[in-house]
Amino acid sequence: MTGKGTLDQDDWAWDELLAFLSLSKIPPVNLLLSSYWTMGAVRHGDYIAKVRIAPDPVFAEAVVRRAIAPASAPEVYRPALVAELQERSYAFDIQVQLCTDLERMPVEDTTVEWPEQLSPFVTVAKLRLPQQDISSPENLEKVDALSFTPWRVTAEHAPLGNVMRLRKEVYRQSSIERHKLNQQPRTEPRSADEVLDPARRRGHAGGA
């Protein structure tokens, strides 16, 4: 917050601290009941936007294992997710919030929440999760060998802003080091069939 004592008090990271504190107040819930945002802005064709993946209200209402107690077991999120998807399918709404005012909806300052009064989120697609069994340890091994980056998108949806540009190299270096430590080859799949069992995926593609 203080740059290890090197910053003047006027330059202390108050905005970042307040943003962190607001997140810490959110109670832990089943992953299917959480919403997920792009950390910063992204290109949306000719527009600037933020993207949110929010639970479809109809599917969210059917979730049984809702509250999560992190201290109750060594692993709590994955068992709840596994159990829910074994019993029923699920869906998220893919939503877009377009930037309509660069002053009040800045691209470079990710601590500023874009007012929904200026531009509400609009659902543009569905992310559908079929009923399935994801409990196999083999799934974890396959996922562990992959790399996450918000830059794996087309040019029309490229991340924007200094934080997103920084993430590109940070995530790349993190992937390199993790694969080196785990003694894994750092390769990316050319299709979903190289990661998931094609027999399980057949007939279960998500739709927009």
Image: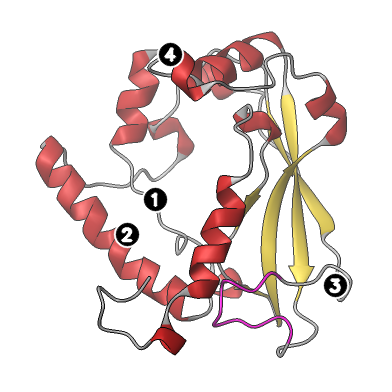
Q: What is the spatial separation of the Cα atoms under label 2 and label 4, in whole angstroms?
A: 29 Å
Read off the magenta span.
104-113
Which residue is pictured at 33% across the width and 29% down the height?
Answer: 142
Report whether 186 appears left or right of 18.
left
Q: Is residue 201 above or below residue 103?
A: above
- In the picture, the disc for residue 73 is 4
Of pointers 1 and 4, the one earlier in the residue sequence: 4
Amino acid tagged 4: Ala
Which residue is pictured at 75% across the width and 19% down the height?
Answer: 63
Of pointers 3 and 2, the one earlier in the residue sequence: 3
Dots 1, 3 in contact, CB < 8 A: no
Q: Residue under label 3, please give it.
A: 119
Image location (x, y in percent) of residue 64: 73, 14
* Mark 1 vs mark 4: in front: 4
Front residue of 131/72: it is 72
- In the picture, the disc for residue 171 is 2
Dots 2, 1 in contact, CB < 8 A: yes
Q: What is the spatial separation of the Cα atoms under label 2 and label 1, in whole angstroms?
A: 7 Å
Report whether 15 appears left or right of 73.
right
Amino acid tagged 1: Phe
Q: What is the spatial separation of the Cα atoms under label 3 and label 4, in whole angstroms?
A: 41 Å
Which residue is pictured at 63% across the width and 29% down the height?
Answer: 29
Q: Residue under label 1, please give it.
A: 148
User: Under tag 3, what secondary structure?
Assistant: loop
Q: What is the spatial separation of the Cα atoms under label 1 and label 3, in whole angstroms?
A: 29 Å
Q: Which quarter of the figure has residue 1?
A: bottom left
Of pointers 3 and 4, the one earlier in the residue sequence: 4
Front residue of 61/175: it is 61
Amino acid tagged 3: Ser
